[in-house]
Structure formats: C-alpha cells, structure tokens
Image (cartoon, rainbow, N blue to C red):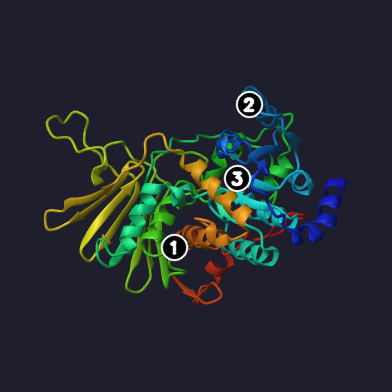
C-alpha cells in the first residue's frame, strides 16, 4: 500500500464525521478530478462563482494537469495544487469539496472515496456506471451525510424548471407518455492497435475498477464512452440528460415494472462496442417512458430541409427536436429542447405557451451554484438533482443496456432483480472489480 493510500484510509473515518459550518464570506475550496472534456468546463466555471476557489487539480495525465493550471494562471487566478492520485486530493485538508469529471466507470468509486474522506461531491452524469454502484453510492451518502449533486444541469435551467412545474400542475392534463430523444450523429472511431502508454499517463489509475488491458488510444479520452468496460454508450452519455428530463415530466417515478430495449451497432466497421441505434420502453403501469438513440442521424431527420423556402419550421418547432423530449398528456403535449419548451393543444396542435432560454445563460454555473448552496446549508433538499434522484435516471439507462445485451424484456423485482432471468441479474454489476478498486 502506498503512503498516499495509507494516509487516505487512515484519515477517512474521522474526516467523514466532520461537517464544517460555513460563514457568509468563506470561500469553498474545490478540487477538480478529471480535467478533460467536462472537466475543462468545471475549470472554466468554478473560478467565476462567488464563494468558490479552485484549489486542487487531479488527472492521471500530467499534461492535462499542467495545461489546466496554466489556464488558471492565464485567467488571473491562483495556481492550484496538482495531484495524480485522487486519494491524495481527497485527503488534503485544504480541499473542502470535489467536482468529479472522470470517465463513467470512476464516478461512484471516486464519489465514495471523497465522501469517506469528508468531502461533499459534485459528480458528472451518469450518477453511476451500473445498478450495483448506484446502490452503493446511496448507502455511503446516507452513512456519511455528505452533500452530493449530479451534473444534470437541465435541473437548474430556469425555463425547463418552469416548464416541468407547469406539466406537473396539469397544463397538458394527465401525462401518460414521456419520450426522450438522443438523435446525435457520431462519427466512426475507426480501428487502433494497442500501443505503449504515453509518458506522463498513469494508465493503471485510469483503468481503476475496470479490467487491466494494454493502453489503447481509442479507450482513452472521449472514446471510452463506446466500450463496455468504461462507458455506457450514448444512452448513458448524452442520453442520460434527456432520460432524466423524461422522468422529471412523469414526476420522477422510481423503478418501472418492466424494461425492454432493442437496437444494434450499424454502419461503420470499427472498434466501438456499444450500440449506435437503440430503442427502449419502461412500463410504469398507467404511464410509459420511451427513449431512442440514433447515432446515424444524417442531418435531415427531424429538421426542415434547408433548401425548402417560404415557410420553414421555426427554430423552436417540435420538428427540430433531435436532442430533447416530447411529453404527451390527456389534454395536450409539449416539446422540449435547449431551444425552448412549447405547449400544444387542440386537434390542430395549436401552440398556447412557450418557455424560452435566457440568452447567454450558463446553466452549468447555475447548477454548480446550487450545489454550493447545498454545501453551505447542509440540506440535500436544496439540491436540484441530488444523488438519490440521479441514480434512478441513470438506472433506466442501465436497464435499457441490460435488456439490449441479453435480448429480452426485463421484469423488475424488489431488491433489483429480474424475474426468472439470472443472466440479466448478473449484469447489475461487473463480473469482477480490479483489486484495490472494489465498489
């Protein structure tokens, strides 16, 4: 056991019991874990939030750490401490809360380690890599009483909040179907042979809970999304945002009665493992949630052809919803995307209400500010997407992937088992966790 690991575990039990009382002018020192992709967005956002300071930067890639610190200094902020091992950051008494933007397979273990070290956590979506890990993170959150917000920034987007409140108040009647759409073209990742690990990269730490394997460029940085060991496909990438909104429109129900999913990987011949086309349905009795992933979108489906003149659909038309949701009620329906939410009624589907975004609004900043409000208040009810809710949204993505991989409908039983389907039940967790990275 390394000295870093030893210090981390020796201090974790006592640290978890402590909760600081924050003064109105106290700055919360943030440690960011994972500096690529969304981590770069975290780095660009926290320094501009009143009452927050970026005090720690952690990544398995030395270059990423150096570039991130260079950006802080260039933007006029103090240089932050750098860490290769997240456990050293979690053990640092100068860090108050952590913001996790690692690959999916690290989300829960990083969150658990942070909570046990006494830190509050903002973690990117999805809340969990699999169903088992979702249950574990909830257990530790209850035990440590730490504040945990998941990065579903739509939950802090004012126009979407107004729209969802209206839906739940019955503006389109009783909702019976909520449909999420992830029509997002993805280019082929191609083929790559294994290669030596680049200098300055801790590949073993990157793999973490996943099986050991040689370094491969396609499994590093963004494309880890498309391999089952580390990602969940687009339904657990872009799709989990729209899945969460679809649940929101239904009133955030718990587990469905059944789940079924079908699809496949079509088109490009490459190394991607996850499907690029997927359809799924979740049965809640008198309501349903339907979800679609279309990674082969050509640019024409769902949008008016650019050459058509005279009466093109407006930008906020439901016909342009490719990444968003459509909600059906007994008295009307609604269509939402980042361009706005429109409400329709009548046989001609006349629009009678619209909620639009505020130009230039930084919804990630709003969501992170909401997290810091919870850190100061110590009240999980202040959070817009606390871990217990976000785990359920991610869980639907996992149910869909399990159904897709076993090729049949799942009947969900209490205790999160699948009736008469031991093969599917095994997929609630990994076949095995790498030693030292168990969840």
Instruction: Say if residue 173 shows up in the picture.
Output: yes
Closer-to-camera residue (249/229): 249
Circle 3 sits in a helix, a strand or a loop, which is it? loop
> What label does residue 71 carry, if any?
2
Q: Which residue is mark 3?
A: 103
Relative placement, left or right, of 4 versus 335 is right
Q: Residue at (86%, 52%) from the top-left corner?
A: 6
In the rendered image of this protein, does residue 252 appear above or below residue 91? below
Q: How many marks?
A: 3
Q: Which residue is mark 1?
A: 407
Residue 357 x, y percent position in the rendering: 35, 41
> What label does residue 128 carry, if any?
none
Relative placement, left or right, of 144 versus 388 is right
Q: Residue at (39%, 39%) from the top-left corner?
A: 185
In this view, the residue farthest toward the front is: 24
Q: Residue at (40%, 45%) from the top-left corner?
A: 266
Residue 262 x, y percent position in the rendering: 39, 58
Circle 1 sits in a helix, a strand or a loop, which is it? loop
Mark 2 and mark 1: span between their CA atoms?
47 Å
Looking at marks 3 and 1 on the same chain, the residue that comes earlier in the sequence is marked by 3
Q: Quick one: label 1, few (<14), some, or many (20+) residues within 10 Å? A: some
Q: Quick one: label 2, few (<14), some, or many (20+) residues within 10 Å? A: some
The answer to whether the residues at label 2 and label 1 have Cβ atoms under 8 Å apart is no
In the rendered image of this protein, does residue 195 appear above or below residue 418? above
Q: Which quadrant would residue 79 be assigned to in this image? A: top right
Closer-to-camera residue (284/437): 284
Circle 2 sits in a helix, a strand or a loop, which is it? helix
Residue 17 x, y percent position in the rendering: 76, 62
In this view, the residue farthest toward the top is: 74
- Classify the position of the C terminus by image quarter: bottom right
Instruction: Say if residue 59 shows up in the picture.
Output: no
């Amino acid at each position: 056991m390394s000295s870093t690991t030893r210090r981390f575990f020796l201090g974790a039990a006592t640290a978890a019991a402590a909760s600081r009382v924050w003064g109105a002018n106290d700055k919360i020192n943030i440690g960011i874990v994972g500096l690529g992709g969304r981590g770069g967005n975290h780095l660009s956002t926290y320094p501009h939030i009143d009452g927050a300071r970026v005090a720690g930067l952690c990544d398995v890639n030395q270059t990423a750490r150096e570039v991130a610190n260079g950006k802080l200094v260039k933007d006029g902020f103090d240089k932050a401490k750098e860490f290769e091992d997240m456990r050293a950051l979690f053990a640092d008494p100068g860090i108050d809360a952590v913001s996790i933007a690692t690959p999916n397979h690290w989300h829960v273990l990083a969150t658990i380690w942070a909570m046990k070290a006494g830190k509050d956590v903002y973690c990117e979506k999805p809340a969990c890599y699999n169903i088992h890990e979702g249950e574990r993170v909830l257990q530790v959150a209850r035990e440590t009483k730490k504040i945990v917000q998941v990065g579903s920034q739509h939950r802090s987007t004012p126009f979407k909040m107004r729209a969802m409140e209206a839906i739940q108040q019955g503006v389109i009647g009783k909702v019976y179907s909520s449909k999420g759409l992830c029509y997002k073209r993805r280019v082929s990742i191609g083929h790559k042979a294994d290669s030596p690990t680049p200098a300055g990269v801790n590949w073993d730490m990157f793999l973490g809970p996943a099986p050991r394997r040689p370094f491969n460029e396609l499994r590093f940085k963004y494309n880890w999304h498309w391999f089952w060991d580390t990602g969940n496909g687009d339904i657990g990438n872009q799709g989990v945002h729209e899945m969460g909104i679809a649940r929101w429109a239904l009133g955030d129900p718990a587990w469905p009665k059944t789940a079924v999913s079908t699809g496949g990987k079509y088109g490009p011949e490459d190394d991607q493992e996850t499907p690029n086309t997927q359809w799924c349905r979740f049965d809640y009795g008198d309501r349903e949630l339907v979800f679609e992933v279309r990674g082969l979108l050509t640019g024409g489906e769902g949008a008016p052809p650019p050459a058509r003149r005279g009466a093109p659909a407006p930008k906020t038309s439901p016909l342009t919803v490719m990444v968003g949701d459509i909600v059906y009620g007994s008295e009307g329906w609604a269509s939402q995307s980042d361009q706005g939410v429109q409400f329709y009624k009548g046989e001609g589907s006349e629009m009678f209400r619209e909620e639009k975004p505020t130009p230039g609004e930084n919804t990630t900043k709003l969501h992170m500010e909401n997290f810091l409000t919870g850190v100061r208040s110590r009240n999980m009810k202040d959070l817009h997407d606390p871990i217990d809710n976000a785990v359920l949204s991610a869980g639907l993505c996992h149910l869909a992937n399990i159904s897709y991989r076993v090729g049949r409908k799942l009947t969900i039983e209490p205790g999160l088992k699948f009736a008469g389907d031991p093969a599917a039940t095994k997929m609630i967790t990994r076949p095995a966790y790498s030693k030292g990275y168990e969840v």
